[in-house]
Amino acid sequence: MPETANTKVWFITGTSSGLGLHLVKAVLARGDLVIATVRDKSKLENIEDRFPAEDSPEGQRLRVVDLDVTLGIELISRVVESAIEVWGRIDVLVNNAAYAEIGAFEELGSRAFRAMYDINVFGVIDVTNAVLPHMRERRSGTIVQVGSRLAWEAERPGRSIFASSKAAVHAFTESLASEVLPFNIHVLSFQPGGFRTEAILATPIHSVNPIRDYDDLRTRMVDRLTVATEKVLVGDPRKGMNVLVDVVRGEGKAQGNQLPRYLVLGPGAAEVVIEKCRVMQEAAQEWRWVTEDLWLDT
Ligand SMILES: NC(=O)c1ccc[n+]([C@@H]2O[C@H](COP(=O)([O-])OP(=O)(O)OC[C@H]3O[C@@H](n4cnc5c(N)ncnc54)[C@H](OP(=O)(O)O)[C@@H]3O)[C@@H](O)[C@H]2O)c1
């Protein structure tokens, strides 16, 4: 498929599996060009079965490159510069790479938080930092930051590590969006939930540092994860990623629409966000009498 005025070049992180891999396929099916990054190609089993063959029409519009998002800004910038050279530009950056883990805060400890934040938060920050100069110079670009529905329902045990990392991504994204809009760079806060992917099915319950007081909680978390897998994780990642491409390209289901600021996607995801907003609204109203009359006396 030859390049047209509408052809976009996508740079997508974390495409070895799950939503990232489905997104690569959905983007290629629209005729766009993709730099798909994986943590380490040499450690990826059956890489040739995951991605379209290099000599196929779709494979010719795809480059799979190594990128561990924890490499740091200098090395990430080099990968990004090489990626830009392939088709001369990056139109759409999707910060998809992330890691999920569940555990009681005290059993996880701050070291586990730093390790997860290195991927889920600083990975997003570094890759964004590396791509932005290019988009700013071109006065054009779209950035999709992959957050999570769980940031809106963090009030259950075991979720502090993952939910807080994604909440950081949400807040970072909101402010970033307002800073780069004058350069015609549009930022989408994408908040998926409920898609049945490899990560979700394999999400480990942290038990490296077991504390007896948390034994019951750990058992409940394992039970809940099993139930969640059957009842909550009912979203089809292929359909979900097709909708994401529609939204970014303003076609299909999103025909004629501008890129929104937020996209909450997946079975039950919208309901979670709506309920959280209701609870927060109620809390703010209910305690308003305490917050009144706190102005500096003039
Ligand atoms: N599935 C859902 O419903 C859901 C819900 C909420 C949020 N999300 C978010 O959606 C995104 C995709 O999740 P998924 O469900 O598709 O999970 P997944 O299948 O595990 O995909 C995560 C990807 O991130 C990659 N990754 C992890 N650490 C990395 C690193 N240091 N450098 C580069 N790549 C790294 C993984 O690569 P390796 O194979 O090398 O580990 C994998 O390709 C994540 O941001 C996740 O938090 C998904």
Image (cartoon, grey):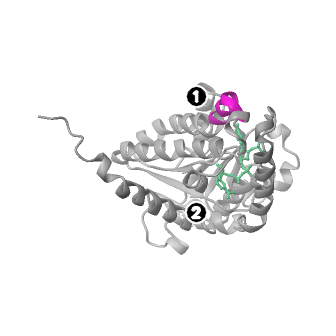
Which is nearer the eye, 168 or 206? Answer: 206
Q: Residue at x 58, y 34 (%)?
A: 122
Given the image, on which type of amino acid does mark 2 rest?
A: Leu
Which of the labelled discs sits on residue 244, or is there none?
2
Residue 239 x/y as whole percent: 67, 69
Measured in 3D between alpha carbons, the distance from the residue under mark 1 to the one under mark 2, in whole angstroms, is 27 Å
Q: Residue at x 61, y 36 (%)?
A: 123
Q: Secondary structure at mark 2?
A: helix
Does residue 103 appear left or right of residue 6 in this picture?
right
Instruction: Please rate how many residues cluster around mark 2, counting C-alpha atoms within 10 Å: few if below 14, some from 14 to 19, many from 20.
Output: many
Given the image, on which type of amino acid does mark 1 rest?
A: Ile
In magenta stretch: residue 53: no
In the rendered view of the protein, which quadrant contains the N terminus? bottom right
Q: Secondary structure at mark 1?
A: helix
Q: Residue at x 37, y 57 (%)?
A: 286
Instruction: Please rate how many residues cluster around mark 1, counting C-alpha atoms within 10 Å: few if below 14, some from 14 to 19, many from 20.
Output: some
Which is nearer the eye, 165 or 282? Answer: 282
Residue 184 x/y as whole percent: 38, 49
- Specify the farthest residue to the top: 74
Please report the bounds of the magenta region as a residue range. Answer: 108-117
Mark 2 residue CB less than 8 A from any atom of ligand 1: no
Q: Please tell me which of labels 1 and 2 falls first in the chain.
A: 1
